[in-house]
Image (cartoon, rainbow, N blue to C red):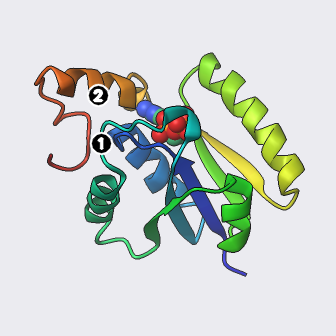
Amino acid sequence: MKRIAIFPGSFDPFTKGHQDIVLRGLTLFDEIIVAIGYNSAKSQRYFPIEFMVEKIGETFKNEPRITVQTFSELTAEFAKRNGARYLLRGLRNTTDFEYENSIAQVNRQLNPELESVFLITSPAFAAISSSIIREVHRYNGDVSSLIPYKI
Ligand code: ADP
């Protein structure tokens, strides 16, 4: 049976930190679905969702084991529908841990077959966050070293 993982997030935008988690995840899983969620708490996106689908697709165009999709349902449901038994997430610090811990507990209740797997950030990408990139980009700063594609 294929080991399929979903890597869900807002990806507003997708960063080199996210790319690192996906590429390292490829050593653990046969397929990874990068799943861009319409997060109700963050409904006002900075980068349009279609734009991000295109850019993530471009980033992994030479890796058929990585695909990208959007979803607007419970992550646990999306995983089930796509035959994914693993939920991949990245951890940068204790703040991420507190947040991820509670989400993982809820996801386990919603879909007991879905196992959450966490990868610790690589030091080189630990300081990268989507919110910092949005802030720099908003004021016309250069974000090219923080994202794996051209914008
Ligand atoms: P969400 O809005 O669901 O938190 P994000 O797009 O912000 O989604 O992040 C998706 C996942 O990637 C989360 O697990 C987050 O902790 C992780 N992540 C974000 N930035 C980094 C980074 N620089 N290194 C490793 N993991 C990261």
What residue is at 85 percent from the left and 62 percent from the top? 113
Residue 149 bears which disc, if any? Answer: none
What residue is at 31 percent from the left and 36 percent from the top? 46
Label 2 residue SS: helix
Q: Residue 3 in the image: x percent, y percent?
A: 67, 71
Asked if the residue at tag 1 contacts the one at tag 2, i.e. Cβ–Cβ closer than 8 Å, the answer is yes
Question: Could you tell which of marks 2 and 1 lies nearer the N-terminus?
Answer: 1
Amino acid type assigned to the residue bearing label 2 in the image: Arg
Does the Cβ of the disc 2 residue fall within 8 Å of ligand 1? no
Of 133 and 93, the residue lying toward us: 133
Q: Residue 7 in the image: x percent, y percent?
A: 55, 53
Can residue 109 be seen by looking at this rendering? yes
Left or right of residue 8: residue 123: left
Residue with the mark numbered 2: 134
Label 1 residue SS: loop
| Depicted 146 relative to depicted 3: above or below | above
Q: Residue 69 in the image: x percent, y percent?
A: 47, 65
Which quarter of the picture shows residue 146?
top left
What residue is at 47 percent from the left and 38 percent from the top? 43
Amino acid type assigned to the residue bearing label 1 in the image: Phe
Of 107 and 42, the residue lying toward us: 42
Residue 47 bears which disc, if any? Answer: 1
| Depicted 72 relative to depicted 102: above or below | below
Label 1 CA crowd tier, 10 Å (few <14, some 14–19, many 20+):
few
Can residue 120 be seen by looking at this rendering? no
Left or right of residue 150: residue 134: right
Of 143 and 50, the residue lying toward us: 50
Assign the N terminus to one quadrant of the image.
bottom right
What residue is at 65 percent from the left and 56 percent from the top? 73
